[in-house]
Image: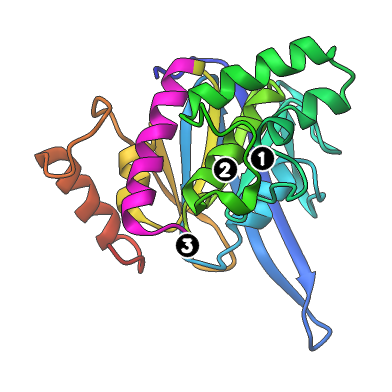
Amino acid sequence: MEPGNHVRVKVDNVSKSFVGINGTAEQVIKNVSFDVYDNEFLVLLGPGRCGKSVLLNMIAGLMGTDEGQILLDGVPVTKPNPEMGMVFQRTGTLPWLTVMDNVRFGPRMRGVPKEEQIKKARHYIDLVNLHGFEKHYPYQLSGGMKQRVGIARAYANDPKILIMDEPFGALDAQTRYNMENEILTIAEGEKRTILFVTNNIEEALLLGDRIVLFTACPAQVKQIYTVSLPKPRDTMQEEFLRLRKAISDNTDLAL
């Protein structure tokens, strides 16, 4: 997917602190700035608990900034926006609903006519390769299949931006690899802007058009890498290995 030139999201000198158990302010985000372009697959890469999820919550409008601002298409983000969809590490599927009803839940809440809800849900269920599982409940699905439901449900809401917070972190290695390939296929087919958080260097390089590397907490932008390799990517390709070493040498993240 080729990123456009239009800045979809602007994170402008953002900082955030919380009051710790000792009563003093603990900064988790410090003077962070970067842009997210239209149709870009941007990866936020950094150590665990460095503040990446807090930053995502601010971008999604779930919490405010202490300093700086976040803009969506030039408009300050002050509350949750239906143009942003989120997929978390824990899928949060509704256990009493089938796959079909989970995926069409958002359109139903928005008052979309039932026939259109079902048509849209079927499209995204097919897109994530869950055809035939429409009547299954979450307890009948594997972890990877549940994540596919979460992705389909997020897409069914027609977000301009899909925010994914370590969505594959709880999966086994083979399922994670399969899901990485799935999300690349979906991203290419749907032409959406994706903001993806991970602490895995190889995953970042497999998926990202650009990678924003963060320091340990408080999170600051350490460096931004452009990955110009065509997708899908070969992990043994010379440029892939060079970038992996460069990022590894620049951080305390494990390969």
User: Who is closer to the viewer here, 247 or 104?
Assistant: 104
The kind of residue tagged 2 is: Met
Q: Is residue 36 visible?
A: yes
Instruction: Tell me: residue 68, above or below residue 48.
Output: above
Q: Is residue 170 left or right of residue 152?
A: left
The kind of residue tagged 3 is: Thr
Q: Secondary structure at mark 3?
A: loop
User: Who is closer to the viewer here, 18 or 159?
Assistant: 159
82 in magenta = no
Q: How is the image coloured?
A: rainbow
Which percent across, then down, holds residue 120?
67, 16
Real-space CA distance between mark 1 and mark 2, rounded to the nearest whole angstrom:
6 Å
User: Which residue in the protein does label 1 denote?
Assistant: 86
Residue contact between numbered discs 1 and 2, judged by CB atoms under 8 Å? yes
Q: Is residue 187 left or right of residue 53?
A: left
Which percent across, then down, holds residue 241?
16, 47
SS assignment for the magenta stretch, majority: helix
User: Who is closer to the viewer here, 207 or 103?
Assistant: 103
User: Which residue in the protein does label 3 denote?
Assistant: 215
Q: Secondary structure at mark 1?
A: strand
Q: Which mark is residue 144?
A: none
Q: Which residues lie in the magenta part?
A: 170-189
Q: Secondary structure at mark 2?
A: strand
Real-space CA distance between mark 3 and mark 1, rounded to the nearest whole angstrom:
24 Å
| Residue at the (66%, 22%) spot, across then down | 121
| Residue at the (78%, 29%) spot, across then down | 106
| Residue at the (51%, 26%) spot, across then down | 131
Sooner in the amino-acid sequence: mark 3 or mark 1:
1
Q: Which mark is residue 164?
A: 2
